[in-house]
Image (tube, rainbow, N blue to C red):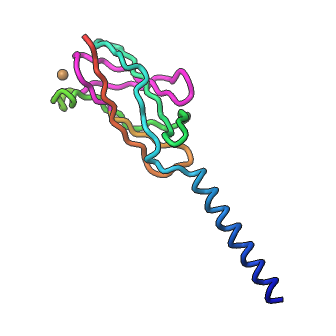
Amino acid sequence: MTKFRYSRGLQAAFIGIAMAGLVSVVRADIKTYEFQLVDQAIKAGSNRVITVRLVNKATGQPVPNAVIFATRLDMAPDGMQEMTTKVTPMPGTEPGTYRFKANLSMAGGWQLSLGAKVQGETGTVENKIIIKAEK
Ligand SMILES: [Cu+2]
């Protein structure tokens, strides 16, 4: 009787460990996600399209259906934080990519600040992407 109870308890412990392992595999840390610039060469001018990909760094896979909720585009990389331009979201062309239309009115370094909510994850992905607008 005593032996039977012991083994049942041990079995439950193993199931608990297995489930904890499963949860850690399914739920990635929000820090494992990052935005990457897709098209490196962007010319200065109006109606430029900026394409970024949200990637799970642990798997290398693009992350579709994220909610992009915060964007700011300014020339902080060239010491012009106050020089901002409007960023307009556009539909993505493939799952996991997100596109924006912007007026890159000056050649030089632009910084795109992005925030995202990923489905099934708590917390916020926050990334700054540097764009080099060519003449
Ligand atoms: Cu500027």
Q: Nearer the viewer, residue 33 or 119?
A: 33
Residues in magenta, as a range: 84-112
What residue is shown at x 35% (from left), y 16% (from top)?
A: 41
Q: Nearer the viewer, residue 52 or 73?
A: 52
Q: Is residue 91 above or below residue 3?
A: above
Ligand 1 image position (quadrant): top left
Instruction: Tell me if 39 is positioned left or right of 14 in this view.
Output: left
**In the rendered view of the protein, which quadrant contains the N terminus?**
bottom right
* Residue 12 in which image quadrant: bottom right
Q: Position of residue 25 (x, y in %)?
A: 59, 52
Q: Nearer the viewer, residue 20 or 44?
A: 20
Residue 88 included in the magenta stretch of the image: yes
Residue 98 included in the magenta stretch of the image: yes
Residue lying furthest bottom in this view? 2
What residue is shown at x 28% (from left), y 21% (from top)?
A: 132
Q: Position of residue 20 (x, y in %)?
A: 62, 62
Residue lying furthest front in this view? 3
What residue is shown at x 46% (from left), y 45% (from top)?
A: 32
What residue is shown at x 39% (from left), y 24% (from top)?
A: 88
